Amino acid sequence: MFSRSARVLPLLFLWISPGCPLAAEPVPADQRDYPDSANGCAPATALNLLRFGGETYLPALNGLIGSTDGVKMRFLVDRYYRHHRSTIDPSRMRWGFHGIDCRDLATGLNELLADHDLLPLSSTYLDRNPEEEERDHLARVFTLIRSSLESGTPPIMNLRTFLVKARPENGSDPEWESGVSHYVLVTAIRGEPSNTGGELEVIDPWQGRRTVCYLHREPNGRAFRALKGSETAGEWLDGRPFLQVVAPGVPTMRPANLEWHERYLVIANHLIGRF
């Protein structure tokens, strides 16, 4: 028994030897550390992309000034968003009280990458193309995510809530309206997606938690409406225009003060990555 242990111990020593250090797992950024706003999911997720994107993004990550994540996020916002005009609506800045628009987030990230001679990222809304079958839509979105992951870039996905409310200003008729917008970082596709849906491993910047979301097409054939773009310059799409997301581990997406009979859903709205 002693000789058997003796054969194992040198191997264990190699694993933990200071000469062969194991790579430490990066710690996700937590949006609550951003000191200037509660809506810090965009800078936190951008920081997580740089942190979990491997050696390619180290120049950009190391170029962020600050000794803490909160200061790094402030530098990122101040340098690339707060003092720049929006690419969608030049009458306002990229950074506002409600955070950063998807397209502005992609623009600022690419400016950061360009400052370090890194190639730009791609970005796209994830709405269904005209005449595209729902299963083809699902497969296309998973292909975009997989392509980015295989390139070494965990993509940033924007989730968006839509709900039906009957309000006096609408004559008490039930109407679709937009709710919460939130960014997560997709780190893996779990298993092989079916033709109805599949699981995504993500980092939720709220508390910097790892969790799993289920990305799927509408299971019951029910139509819904969703806004593509901003409230001021977007387009409401009918039918089943986006894939839906079940995200019980992302509490930010749950609407407050929703009555039992009021419908809501979460969609996969936008993607930033390499595809």
Image: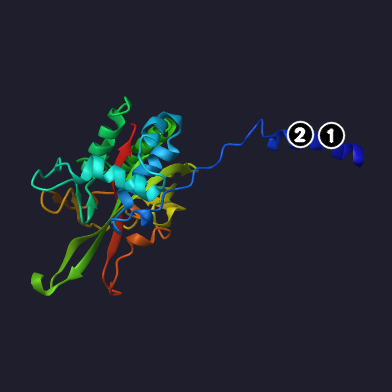
* x and y percentages locating residue 89 in the rendered image: 11, 45
- Residue 14 in view in this figure: yes
* x and y percentages locating residue 28 in the rendered image: 45, 48
> Considering depth in this image, is 110 or 273 the residue closer to the camera?
110
Q: Residue at x 69, y 38 (%)?
A: 16
> Within 10 angstroms of label 1, few (less than 14), some, or many (20 or more) residues?
few
Residue that extends furthest to the top in the rendered view of this protein? 117
**Total marks in image:** 2
Q: Quadrant of residue 15?
A: top right
Q: Amino acid at mark 2?
A: Leu
Q: Quadrant of the N terminus?
A: top right
> Within 10 angstroms of label 2, few (less than 14), some, or many (20 or more) residues?
few
Q: Is residue 93 above or below residue 248?
A: above
Q: Quadrant of residue 164?
A: bottom left
CA gap, disc 2 and disc 1: 7 Å
The residue that disc 1 covers is 7
Where residue 11 is drawn, which disc sits there? 2
Q: Amino acid at mark 1?
A: Arg
Q: Residue at x 39, y 45 (%)?
A: 185
Q: Is residue 253 above or below residue 120?
A: below
- Residue 128 in view in this figure: no
Where residue 156 is drawn, which disc sits there? none
* x and y percentages locating residue 241 in the rendered image: 23, 49
* x and y percentages locating residue 250 in the rendered image: 39, 58
> Considering depth in this image, is 224 or 101 the residue closer to the camera?
101
Tag 2's secondary structure? helix
Q: Is residue 167 above or below residue 78?
A: below
**Discs 2, 1 touching: Cβ within 8 Å:** yes
> Considering depth in this image, is 65 or 148 the residue closer to the camera?
65
Q: Quadrant of the C terminus?
A: top left
Tag 1's secondary structure? helix
Q: Is residue 192 left or right of residue 21?
A: left
